[in-house]
Amino acid sequence: MRISILYGQGLALLALAGCRLTSTEVEPALPTGRFNSSSTVVYRANGSPVVANNSADIGTFIVALFGAKLPVTATLAGDSTLTIRAIDSRNQPDGYPQHDLTLQVSKFRGSGTYALQVGRYYSGTMYQEYAATPTGLVAQAPQSPIAGAVNQLTITAWDPAQRTLQGTFELLAVAPSNAQLTTAITAGSLDVDVE
Amino acid sequence: MKHLYLLLCLLPLGSLAQNAPAWGGGVGVGNGVEVHAGRQQRGWLALARVRYRWWRPGSGPGSSFLDDVNTKSRQLEVAAMAGYGVPLGRTLLYGGTGLSYLYGRHLGDCRYTAAYSGLVGSRTYYYAYRDYQALGLPLEIGWLSPPRQQARLGLAFQANFNPERTLFGGMLTLWLGHFGDTVTP
C-alpha cells in the first residue's frame, strides 16, 4: 500500500516536472536613431531585420585608402536627386546573408513624402540580397519596386546646415528576371549624413 | 546521588538530541552560482537550492569570449528536493530529487549585428530568444568532506530535466552548520 502511494507520488512529480508554464518568442527590436553615432539605415526584409551602419577602425581606414566606400552613404546630386545606399556587408558575420538597398528620389526639397524612383536596371531604387551558401555568398537577382505598390520615402527631418537627414521608408520589390523573387521592405528607418 | 539521578534523566534527551534534525546552508560555484540549504534527520534529507546559470552561444556569432551579444542564455532554478545520505567514513554521500521552478531565456538565431568604432572595431550580435517558465525535475548527487569547525566542502553533480532546457553541471559547494553531522557510521 505504502509503496503504491510512493509510486503514485513519484508519477505525479514526473508529470509536474514536464510542465511548461509560459513560453514567449522574443525578436530583438530594431535600433532607433543613429547607431554608434554614425549614419544608420534599418529595415525588415520579408520580416528579417537588417541593420547597416558606419563605423571606423583600423581596417576601414586601410580599405578607405584604396577607395572603399562606407556601408551607408547619402548623396544629393545637383539636380536634387537624393540617393541613399545601405549595405550591411561589414556588419554581417560569415555565413549570413547580406543586403544591399538603394533608395532614390528625385526633386528632393526637404521634409515630405516622396515616391521612390524606379530607374533602369542597376539604377534608381534597388534591392539585392547575397545569399549565404556553403561555398560563399551568391548574389541573387537585383529587385526593383513593383509598380502600384506603396514605394515611398518619408523625410521627417532635414537639416541643410548640418546636412543630416531622418526619415522612414517602405517598398515592395521584385526581380525583373524572376517574378517569384519578391521582397517586402518594411519598418524602414534612416538617420544619415548627406555628402 | 542527586547528580546521578539527573544524569539518568538527561540520558534519553541526549539520545533524542542525536536524532534531532540538523540544519545547514551555504553557497556553491561551478556551472553557475547557487545558494542552498538542507535539513537532515538520520539519513533523510530535505534540500533546497536556488541556482543561476548563464552562458553565451556555443558556436557561431557571439560565441567567442571577446564577442558582445545583446543577451545571454540563462536559467534561474528554485528547487526543493528530498533525498538520503549515507556516511562514507566521516564524509557524506547523498542524493536527492524533487520539483523545481525554472525561469529562463534561451537564445535562438542571430538576427543582425551592429558595428562599433574603435582601434580594432567591434560588433554586437543581436539574437532572437525565448523566455520561458517551467517546472522541472531536479537531481543532485553530492559528496561532503569531513566537518571542520561546522563547515564542509563538497562536490555536487546536478541536473534538471525539464521541457525547455535540460541542464547538467558540477558545483563546488560550501556547507555551514550541522548538515550531515547526525549521519554517523
Image: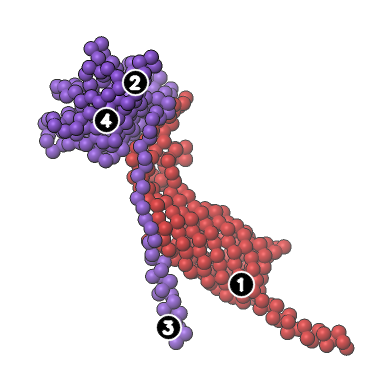
Chain colours: A purple, B red
> Percent x, y for residue B91?
63, 68
Measured Cα–Cα span from mark 2 to mark 1:
72 Å
Q: Determine which residue is flagged by label 4.
A: A169
Q: SS class of the residue under badge 3?
A: helix
Q: How far apart are marks 2 and 3 (CA)?
A: 77 Å
Is disc 4 in contact with disc 2, using a CB cutoff of under 8 Å?
Answer: no
Left or right of A177 on screen, residue B80 = right
Front disc: 2 or 1: 2
Chain ID of residue with mark 4: A
Q: Mark 1 lies on which chain?
A: B
Asked if marks 2 and 1 fall on the same chain, the answer is no
Task: Name the kind of residue labelled 4 in the image.
Answer: Phe
Instruction: Please give the residue where the numbered disc 1 appears in the rendered image.
Output: B40
Mark 2 or mark 3, whichever is nearer to me: 2
Residue at the limit of the structure toward the front, as seen here: A112
Residue at x-position 72% and y-position 62%? B149
Residue A140: in sight, yes or no? Answer: no
Question: Residue at left 30%, top 25%?
Answer: A155
Q: How crowded is mark 2: few (under 14 residues within 10 Å), some or many (20 or more)?
A: some
Tell which of A33 and B7 is nearer to you: A33
- Please name the residue shown 25% across and 26% down the image: A113
> Can residue B28 be seen?
yes
Say whether disc 4 or disc 2 marks the residue closer to the N-terminus: 2
At label 2, the amino acid type is Trp
B30 sits left or right of A178 in the view: right
- List the residue tagged with mark 2: A158
